[in-house]
Image (cartoon, grey):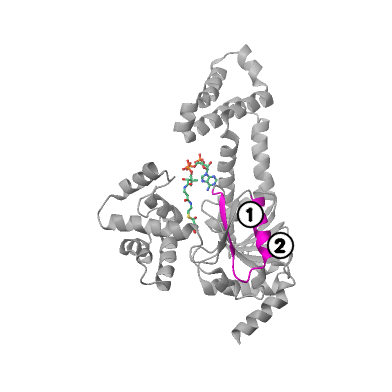
Amino acid sequence: MAFATRRFVRSASSAAAKKLIVKHVTVIGGGLMGAGIAQVAAATGHTVVLVDQTDEILKNSRKGIEDSLKRMTKKMFTDKPEEMILRCMIYTQHWTVVWLIPDSARLLCWFLLLLPKSWALRSSHPRLTRKLVWTSLCFLDKQGSAVFEAAAQFIEKTLKNLTVSTDPVAVVHSTDLVIEAIVENLQVKNDLFKRLDKFAPENTIFASNTSSLQITDIANSTTRQDRFGGLHFFNPVPMMKLVEVIKTPMTNQKTFESLMEFTKALGKNPISCKDTPGFVVNRLLVPYLMEAVRLYERGDASKEDIDVAMKLGAGYPMGPFELLDYVGLDTSKYIIDGWHSLEPNNPLFAPSPLLNKLVEERKMGKKTGEGFYKYK
Ligand code: CAA
């Protein structure tokens, strides 16, 4: 009977699934992931409404987005020092002044600008290089050059595309795509989507950013399983280039294509995934992280040495303990616990007493100031 009902829903709603160019996006959940998704969508010209339960949460999300945009522009505008020097000279017209009036301040600017040009410095100290270029620009252009203007305009334009709301039902009536990034609780997600399903236009696509639940289980709370998929982003969203686009057996091909195109429009690199636990990245990453914890629990190596080993020996940007703290120990525990309940005999999914203890002590990683490491 359930099968027959599902088939009916599918055939009735498939007619409505068309390829959609996504312009208006509603992001539900103002946490790190939701705010990051909203930021990237707004920065790439989409109009975005970010939704969460209280104004206080949304105020924090907006503050986080503003800070991240500042960090991003700093990187965007200082990644190519030579280009920056040239642009700076053209825009500010200071270059003639630099030659004609070699006062100490101008000399310092030149020194700071030329220093990051050095290949050796740039490759060994990328962060220092960016800071030097930025400092140089600040010196050179106190009045506000075109460089700073472009950065400010980018931030302003992005923020203009972004509004916030505490009422998801009131905002979904004109949205092309709803992306959910709320708590990893199936019942809560299902209640939300069931409600939105009644108010969103027929052609609106629904997507979940879940990292541990099955997309199919969430989609089944709606009557639009064919217009439902997964969009799995990575932390920090503005920096990580990958998005996993999840197609369930019910996802219409047009819906899937719309989601692929949307992620490309965000400047991301999408990959196609089936609705399997952990999709691709987490299925490989989480067992690796858990193996690192077990190695440490057995006393085979210190966490510091394991982190160094994976950074210097395997070329990872962060060691496993740094990454666990960055992602959040509660998130990692949630994922592994879910998989363990599905496959209790799989040793890769075995829970870790140390991870459980840290989460119990509310040591969740960077966000709470302590995890495997302590943060100021
Ligand atoms: N917003 C905007 N810009 C940011 C940023 C953010 N949140 N984070 C970093 N940046 C930019 C800034 O320009 C920053 O410069 P400043 O610090 O001067 O502002 C610049 O990147 C460099 O950052 P860092 O010097 O701090 O460090 P980095 O060069 O090593 O880059 C990193 C940081 C991108 C996070 C890098 O360490 C990295 O790639 N780490 C691995 C992250 C990872 O594996 N993520 C996936 C986690 S798994 C997941 O998310 C899925 C899940 O379901 C659990």
Q: Is mark 1 within 8 Å of ligand 1?
A: no
- Residue 151's x, y, as percent? 64, 38
Which segment did they paint magenta?
240-266
| Among numbered discs 2 and 1, the one appearing first in the sequence | 2
- Please say whether residue 59 is visible from this viewpoint: no
- Please say whether residue 344 is visible from this viewpoint: yes
- Residue 5's x, y, as percent? 64, 83
242 sits left or right of 9 in the view: left
Q: Residue furthest bottom?
A: 1
Q: Is mark 2 within 8 Å of ligand 1?
A: no
Q: Residue furthest top?
A: 100
As drawn, the label of residue 176 is 2
290 sits left or right of 144 in the view: left
* In magenta stretch: residue 260: yes
**Quarter occupied by residue 136:** top right
Q: Which residue has dot 1 on it?
A: 263
Marks 2, 1: nearer the viewer = 1
Callout 2 amino acid? Asp
Q: Quadrant of the N terminus?
A: bottom right
